[in-house]
Image (cartoon, helix red, strand yellow):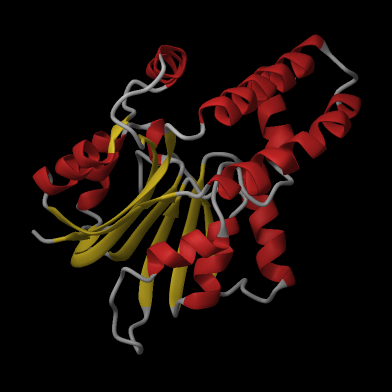
Amino acid sequence: MTELELIIDLHKNSERQGPGSEKETLKALDFMDFPNDRNLKIADIGCGSGGQTISLAKKLSGQITAIDLFPEFLNELKAKSEKIELKSEIKTLEKSMDELPFDNEELDIIWAEGAIYNIGFENGIKKWKNNLKKGGYLAVSEITWITNLRPKEIETFWKQEYPGIDIASNKMKILEDNGYTIVGYFYLAQDSWIENYYKPMEARFQQFLDRNNNSELAKKVVEENKSEIGLYLKYKDYYSYGFYIAKKNE
């Protein structure tokens, strides 16, 4: 297996492939205002195995297109949606997030939890805007500094991993400069990282290694994730995912 295939193998059976929770998905959704009888068209971009997709489908009336580049995650989502009888509400699509197949102003909601970094925050909100109806909503979670000053170690790490990391006010300005109005913002609680993401991942490490014959590459994947977990536990007061909810106004 390649390193990418191993990373997929580690994460494919998890509820989420990044920090988050149903509570926070629904908190973001509460900032949106639609008529109760509206049949919505929604795209969940970079959906992974669809923890948030399922939460949205239970709450909203309409059709969700769940988009991911990796069929392993989409297959997990299909199986889950069939099991809880949400198959008709959720359509899966294997596609890159920078090649969305939607018409101009087709979508009521564009949702992306922990995924927009793949094409960059500003690039993503610009590319996806045309697919969103005027008055439609964008909801994205994005790695965000939650303090103005940080220890050098964690600042250096994130600037190497993702140079687009920034404080929330600068992210909001990008949204406003591109024709959106901010309707809500919050950052993810620490439990969304530790209890919902890191602890379940740690519990999968040994089976993952066994499944992959304790290969050096599999060990490398585990060690890199352990290092990330250690950094978060050390510096969790300085960064999180910020959840940005915005309305298209032009």
> Does any portion of residue 101 appear in the rendered image?
no
Indicate whether 155 appears above or below 216: below
Judged left or right of residue 56, residue 38 is: left
Identify whether 121 is placed above or below 14: above
Estimate the x, y position of residue 172 in percent, counting from the top left. Answer: 20, 45
Asked which quadrant contains residue 149, the reply is top left
Residue 248 as seen in the image, left or right of residue 225: left
Of residues 91 and 194, which is closer to you in this image? 194
Q: Residue at x 29, y 40 (%)?
A: 124
Judge whether residue 37 can be spotted in this image.
yes
Residue 13, horizontal then vertical, whole percent? 74, 46
What residue is rendered at 35% in x and 89% in y?
37
Q: How many marks?
A: 0
Residue positioned most to the bottom: 37
Depth check: 38 or 238 in front? 238
- Foreground residue among 111 and 31: 31
Q: List x then y, in percent, for residue 180.
A: 16, 54
